[in-house]
Amino acid sequence: MEFISPELSRYCEMHTSEESDILKKLNRETHLKIVSPRMLSGHLQGRFLSFISKLKQPSLIVEIGTYTGYSALCLAEGLAQNGKLISIDVNEETSAFARSFIQQTEYAGKIELVIADAQEYLKTIQQPIDLIFIDADKKNYLNYYRLAIEKLKPGGLIIADNVLWSGKITMPESTMDRETQALHEFNKFAQQDNRVENILLPVRDGLMIVRKK
């Protein structure tokens, strides 16, 4: 969901750096061939992720939720010279689709696609992480956060997508469905966590950005 009008959204995109040709193709092919194409980050959010990554110049990015690889490619644009991005997903079909596009780019050697349960895989990562992007099953956002924050370097970032959940996040708690409730609990936890500073932005479906102190 967009929280601004379609006209304002188009205006923002017109005044934002263009996505690459491969990202345009990936966007188009996702909408033609893959179920639930609205899950793709898209032009504006993708440029935002790229911008943040370029500012951070991370050595290690961990992405929880690959989908078709659009956000992974955007985040990889800011990797340090010898940096690496690990993208974790349980869906073999969409990960294979993502791999077919990633292999066409200069980031093919820097992006590792992993088919695994993200909670279990996170436990195996020993190297400190610079940036973590969470965009997977909503009921486990808080579980991912609790694991990720321990692996994150001081000054490192966690970015979580869909935290406004089409505006349902403002409903009375007694009327929230399971996913909305899980996201609400995640947002509250991040807000109250004295280990971090955070900002929630109404970009696309909501981005929670957390910086570890």
Image: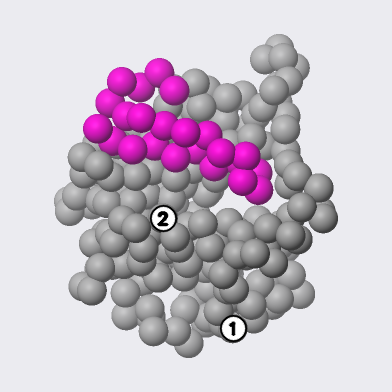
Check residue 60 in the rendering and tell me which mark sits there, or answer none.
none
Instruction: Write down the residue under mark 2.
Output: 52
Residue 193: within the magenta? yes
Residue at 21%, 73% in the rendered image: 82
Residue at 27%, 51% in the rendered image: 130
Indicate left or right for 68 with 63 as reference: right
Q: Is residue 154 above or below residue 176?
A: below
Residue at 33%, 51% in the rendered image: 131
Range shown magenta: 191-213
Indicate left or right for 124 with 205 as reference: left
- The amino acid pointed to by label 2 is Ile
Q: Point out the residue furthest to the bottom here.
A: 104
Instruction: Write down the residue under mark 1.
Output: 21
Q: Position of residue 98 (x, y in %)?
A: 53, 73
Residue 47: within the magenta? no
Q: Nearer the viewer, residue 151 or 124?
A: 151
> What is the distance, in whole Å, between disc 1 and disc 2 at their CAs?
20 Å
